[in-house]
Amino acid sequence: MPSSIPDALNTLCGGLILISAFAMVAVRQVQGVTRFFVAQSVLLATSCFLLAYSQHSMDLFALGLITIGAKVVTIPWVLRRLLPSEFYERREINQVINIPTSLLLSLLLAIFAEFLVSPMVNAAHNPVISLNLPIGLACLLIGAHSLMARREAIPQLIGILAMENGTFFAGIAIAPQLPIIAELAIAVDVALIAVVVGLLTRNIQETLGTTEAASLDELKEEVAE
Amino acid sequence: MTLIAILAIPLLGALLCWFRPLRKHASSVTMLCSWAVFALVLDVAARVIARGKVVGIPGWFEADGLSALVLLLVSFVCALACVFARGYMRHEHDDGRLSWFYANYNLFAFAMLAVPCLAGPNLTWVAVELVTLFGALLVGFDNTASSLEAAWKFAVLTIMGAPIALFGFFALFWAYHSATGGASETWDGLRLMAGSMNPAVLRFSFLLVFVGFGAKSGLVPMHTWLPDAHSQAPTPVCAVLSGVKTTVPLYVILRFLGVVLASPTARVGNWMIVLGLVSVGIAAFLLVQVRDYKRMFAFSTVEHMGIILTAAGMASQAADFGAVSQILNHAITKSLCFYVAGVILLILSTREIGSVRGLLRISPFAGSALLFCSLAIAGAPPFPIFLSELSILSAGVEGGHKVVVAILATLIVIAFVAILSHVNRMLLGKPETPVLAYALPASCRFTVWAAAVPVLVLGVYIPAPVHSLLQLAAHQLGGR
């Protein structure tokens, strides 16, 4: 049972983060995926602030600010600036697996995550860890799954960033004392990744006229006759 | 101080390449910087051999045997690759894009050099990410549809490994912090405290880092970016990517393995052996049906990464020595292979194995170089890879891993036959179409000669300093 109000609110954030991970698997539009990603990042930042308050940690507070700066402001802005709107607002994302199957797989991944971390969580006796660690791992795995299931550049990129959200949600619980320099470096790194991948995406789109990764199929091992 | 200079010089080089009056000379600037770094690294390696450890800033920049080995390989391959690039890149691009290429190349070298210099795992993660970023930009440098496709696959698959590995480092921090109560985290400190960390958390974090960085070293099933990137990137970049870029994340995995093995209860060797064998196996069968000679060398990289992993998983001192010698031999031989592939590409402008016939008649230089390097990379007797593979196999038998050794030996033989039969087809026979005489740039010719020297020497004679460096490095892997 969560003991204090910040911890209870953190539990709420955790639940909503997991739901938004499922939502990102379920929606069909590129814009929908982006919106749920921004919502998830806001929840992550909220959770950072809550833990910063309950543990009196400036590091976590800074991490929350960095998350808002990088994932709520910069990355959506970079994506909007770099890509023309017709690609950004495409209606249907090309899926390899259909959405109900995808959701079922995501559910299995979430259960698997809980199963994987339960021995470690039981040893820790900490309500925040026992909530954040399984949810973070579940978001990581679901993000990886959606990356595999989607064949388009922007949803793939957001899949990676959603995986990172999961990692940070677990990280703020299990490693809240992580030195500030590492956090800064990590945040800068996330922004760099977005810029580089954004640049690549634009080049690909200029060269090929589409950002559908499924049309990137020139390089394959041919079967020998 | 030397360690900091090693990192500062490539950064300075990148800046100078951007500097407008120097743009015309970007290639010379890069060569100067890379060779200066190589000289400094030789000094660091000598001091590591004498004293066991070189400290730049305690707790931040430190180098021991394993880091010195990786530093040496990275700086050597980077120094030769930019000599090769001087002749190779000039034909294709104008000065503006070339200076951009060299600036990026310097940053790529900086990131790779930073990984072994850093003393703590968290910043190492950041450095590995930087390697990926600059690597992706270099792979897509040609801006053609297929090179961008390769860059995209490279970026997605390897950046995807980043959050997974980061999760692992968070878990490692958690284990370390609960055991020590707040000392700052260095690889040495982790090894010391491994015994008192929670083994379940330690194993969990190793698994995550292993999966995340395994994707970056091209281990099956996340290897699909590797042949694409290595066939599409400009050839000098291929040499760096295949020779040392794959080794850099593997270095972190091996470091971490040293920590895990220092704990009496956490066991991870079997995972590494199984995944290593799967990589070797898939690579061996892909080698049989490959159609593009640059992809052929790329799959051989997957094979070698698998062999190194299997050897490290055996966790005995002899196998560890085999693993680090394999790292050394793979780096020097594979970079040579890509220089030769680049030379063939310059002469014939095709990557297809099927459309290369009678290379020995077209160009005796390229033909004999291809024969030399493919025998060396496949592991034929007088070459260093043969020696290190043999020592891995015999260490496996001593350690009681007979089944593993049998499978590994079979797969190595399959890969050997596959590589040589492809090369055989390329070398012999009559040229199908008359090929225009092509004047090979002197710098390309020089690079092939210079890169062949260590391959030739290490096969017959391992100098005493190299041997003691390898022993120091093997010690870090923590086998008993």
Image: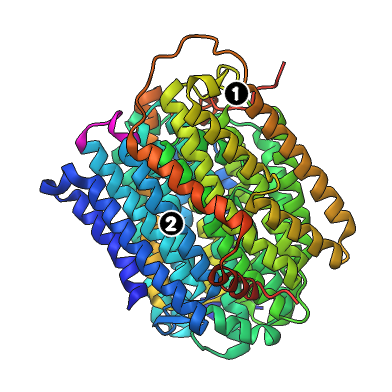
Question: For this view, does B311 lie left or right of residue B70?
Answer: right
Tell me which chain the residue with mark 2 is part of: B
Residue A29 horizontal side relative to residue B404, left or right: left
Mark 1 and mark 2 lie on one chain; the one further toward the N terminus is 2
**Which residue ends up furthest to the bottom in the rendered image?**
B181
Q: Which secondary structure, mark 2?
A: helix
Does dot 1 land on a helix, a strand or a loop? helix
Check the image and report above or below for B311 versus B150. below
State the residue at coordinates (61%, 45%): B301
Check residue B426 in the rendering and tell me which mark sits there, or answer none: 1
Q: Is residue A126 above or below residue A143?
A: below
Rendered-image quadrant of the C terminus of chain A: top right
Magenta residue check for B91? yes
Q: Residue visible at 33% across and 58% down?
A: B35
Image location (x, y in percent) of residue B205: 64, 68
Local packing at callout 1 (Cα closer than 10 Å; few below 14, some 14-19, many 20+) is: many
* Magenta run includes residue B392: no
Of residues A48 and A183, which is closer to you in this image?
A183
Amino acid marked by disc 1: Met
Q: Position of residue B134 (x, y in %)?
A: 38, 49
Find residue B76 and name its label: 2
**Magenta range:** B88-95
Q: Which residue is farthest left?
A: B21
The chain under label 1 reads: B
